[in-house]
Image (cartoon, rainbow, N blue to C red):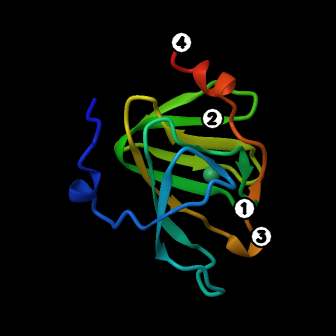
Amino acid sequence: MDKLNNLSERELFPKGVKLPNDHFTGRAWLSMLVEDDRIFNCPIGNVSFEPSARTNWHIHQGGQILLVTAGKGYYQEKGKKVQVIHKGDVVKIPSSVNHWHGASPDSWLVHIAIMPNSQKGPVEWLEPVTNEEYNVISG
Ligand code: MN
C-alpha cells in the first residue's frame, strides 16, 4: 500500500489548514472546496488524515458522501463492522447515523467530504474513537 509520504506533491487539492483536535484524534487537514450557502446547501471539503488519525464519532443530519481520493482508511457506523476504504471508493452515509472515518495505521487517507442538506443543521460531534475501538480493526 502506498503510504503517500509525499502527499502534498501528489494530491489534487490543497491540503489546507490543520484541524483543531476538538473533534479529531491525530492530525488532519481541511481544505474547503465549496463553502456552505443557502442556494446549494452542500458544502464540500477535502480532508487529509495522517496515519491513525480519525474523526470523533459524529452525525450529519443531512447525510454525507465521501469520495476517497488517496490512501487507505476505515469507515464505521455505530454497532456495525468496520469497513476498509481505499482510493476510488464512494461511501454514502445516511442522515442521522452515528459514524466515524479516518486513516489506517499504515497509510494516509484523503477524501472529499460532501455534506448535502446543510440546512438541516451542523455536524453533531460526539466522543472520540478510543484506541480500544480503533485497534480492534487491525487485529
Ligand atoms: Mn462524517
Q: x, y percentage for residue 45?
A: 49, 66
As helix, strand or loop, the secondary structure at mark 1 comes to loop
Q: How far apart, in angstroms, are the residues tagged by discs 4 and 2?
A: 16 Å
Amino acid type, callout 2: Gln
Task: From the viewer's perspective, tell me whether residue 29 is left or right of residue 77.
Answer: left
Q: Residues within 10 Å of mark 4 (few under 14, many from 20)?
A: few
As helix, strand or loop, the secondary structure at mark 2 comes to strand
Amino acid type, callout 4: Gly
Task: From the viewer's perspective, tell me whether residue 90 is left or right of residue 69.
Answer: right
As helix, strand or loop, the secondary structure at mark 4 comes to loop
Q: Nearer the viewer, residue 123 or 55?
A: 55
Which residue is at 74% across, 68% downward? Answer: 122
Q: How far apart, in angstroms, are the residues tagged by discs 1 and 4?
A: 30 Å
Q: How far apart, in angstroms, are the residues tagged by discs 3 and 1?
A: 7 Å
Q: In the rendered structure, find residue 76 and report the number of the disc placed on it.
A: 2
Q: In the rendered structure, find residue 139 and report the number of the disc placed on it.
A: 4
Amino acid type, callout 1: Val
Quadrant position of residue 14: bottom left
Quadrant position of residue 4: top left
Q: x, y percentage for residue 132?
A: 68, 22
The answer to whether mark 1 is within 8 Å of ligand 1 is yes
Q: In the rendered structure, find residue 121 and report the number of the disc placed on it.
A: 3
Which residue is at 77% across, 70% downward? Answer: 120
Amino acid type, callout 3: Gly
Q: How far apart, in angstroms, are the residues tagged by discs 2 and 1?
A: 17 Å
